[in-house]
Amino acid sequence: MRSNILKGYFFALVATLAFSNVYIFSKAALNEVHLTQFGVYWFAIGFLVSLGFAIKNKKLAQVRILSKRQVRTLIILGILEILTTTTFFLSVNIIPDPSVTSFLGNMFPVMVTLGGVVLLRERFGWIEAIGVFLALVGAFLISYTGGTTLKTLFISGTGIVFLNAILATSATLVVKVHVKKLSPELLGLNRTAWLLVYSLIMFLIYKQSFIIPVSALKNIAVGSILGPFLAIVSVYYSYTYIEASRSAIVQSLKGIFVLIGAFLFFHTFPVRHQFIGGMITVIGVLVMTLAKAGLFRKSKQNEN
């Protein structure tokens, strides 16, 4: 039992580090190529790696025995992943500093928790509520521009990040229910297959060229292995060993890793109120997820 828990946290840490680098390498690539060019190469590489991994682990045979309900689940997940991933990379493309995008992305674990309470009837106490409040306050500070109208109140891309969090929450809740019946390899392959097909369609619609700079291709190659393959599969594996809320504890530190990476790669750093807001979101998510994992309840029981 203990070894399974450690495995769960290990996969969560791998996913967090991989996700953090996705912000960096995708931003670097998107600075040079069109979003549709990026998508085709990103998901083509991710699909091939995911396919090879599924074949190696002999998981493709599972396709033959899928029930109608499981096929529907994979289709729903595919559609959700298209919407989620599109909004994610749009936000990365629009917001100049990837660390700001990452800090705003902390709305995702907040919405996962709230979604679990509403749809899965998970517990929600006052400590979790404090964490949610802190995360929302932090997100407001990050996105606030000082404007007086709704159009100028928040930085560009804020609405897309929040839409992405809602869509990602929906996909996560579906995965949480079905991850025990569908292997992580199959879920990851399903995701990249849908996204590759969608990217090819958009590529043809926008009539882009397959020719891109070598530097962009290098960033896409590294990022696509870390993102569509390593990060996604690691997250799914972490869910098989530990609760999603416990996995989210580790994943909530993603913003700090992205902050360091953005500074090293792009020499960018959020302005003071954005940095403060980002730290508040991290603290809020940590408080919320630690409480959700029952850490505060255990410590209280030990005192008694």
Image (spheres, rainbow, N blue to C red):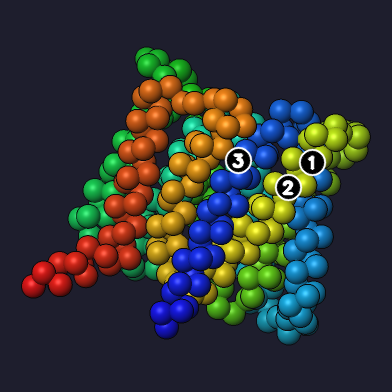
Residue pushed farthest front?
264
Can the viewer see residue 39 in this picture? Answer: no
Q: Give the residue type at disc 2.
A: Val
Q: Earlier in the sequence, mark 2 or mark 3?
A: 3
- Label 2 sits on a secondary structure element that is helix
Can the viewer see residue 184 in this picture? Answer: yes
- Label 1 sits on a secondary structure element that is helix
Q: Position of residue 91 (x, y in %)?
A: 59, 35
Q: Nearer the viewer, mark 1 or mark 3?
A: 1
Q: Which mark is residue 222?
A: 2
Q: Earlier in the sequence, mark 1 or mark 3?
A: 3
Q: Which mark is residue 218?
A: 1
Q: Give the residue type at disc 1.
A: Lys
- Measured in 3D between alpha carbons, the distance from the residue under mark 2 to the one under mark 3, in whole angstroms, is 12 Å
- Measured in 3D between alpha carbons, the distance from the residue under mark 1 to the one under mark 3, in whole angstroms, is 15 Å
Q: Is residue 212 above or below residue 177?
A: above
- Measured in 3D between alpha carbons, the distance from the residue under mark 2 to the one under mark 1, in whole angstroms, is 6 Å
Q: Is residue 271 above or below residue 77?
A: above
